[in-house]
Amino acid sequence: MRARTIHDYRKHIEWLTRYLSEHHPDVKVIRQLTADVIRAYVAYLKNERKPYQGAGKRERQTKGLSVNTINIRSA
C-alpha cells in the first residue's frame, strides 16, 4: 500500500474519531459502533460537514460532502 493511501486512511479514522467524541462520547471502542451510529455519521457527512473543513482558504461555507467523498471516507 502506498504511503499516501495509509495517510488518507489515518485521516479518515481521525475524522470519525472526532465525530464520535463530539456526537457519541459513549462510544469508546470499536465494538460499540452500531449501524445506527454509522448511519448518523453518514448523515452528518451528507448534511452538516463542510467541504475542506479546517483547510484554511479551501474551506467552503456550504454544508454537506459529495456522495463520492462520503463513500471514500466510510469505506
Image (cartoon, helix red, strand yellow):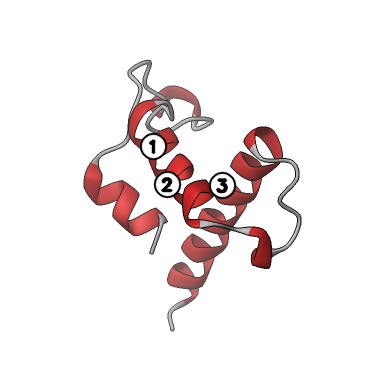
Residue position marked by numbered label 2 in the rendering? 39
Q: Position of residue 38 (x, y in %)?
A: 48, 51
Give the farthest residue toward the bottom: 1
Residue of label 1 = 43
Distance between the Cα atoms at labels 2 and 1? 6 Å
In percent of width and height, residue 13 lies at 57, 58
Q: Residue drawn 74% across and 41% down?
A: 25
Q: Residue type at mark 2?
A: Arg
The quadrant of the picture occupied by the N terminus is bottom left
Give the camera-side residue of 38 and 60. 38
Q: Left or right of 10: which side holds 22?
A: right
Disc 1 residue type (three-letter): Ala
Question: Which residue occupies the foreground of this view, 18 or 44?
Answer: 44
Circle on res. 30: none
Horizontal side, residue 54 vs residue 44: left or right: right
Say whether disc 3 or disc 1 marks the residue closer to the N-terminus: 3
Image mark count:
3
- Tag 2 secondary structure: helix
Front-most of residues 14 and 20: 20
Is 60 located above or below residue 22 in the figure? Answer: above
Given the image, on which type of amino acid does mark 3 rest? Trp
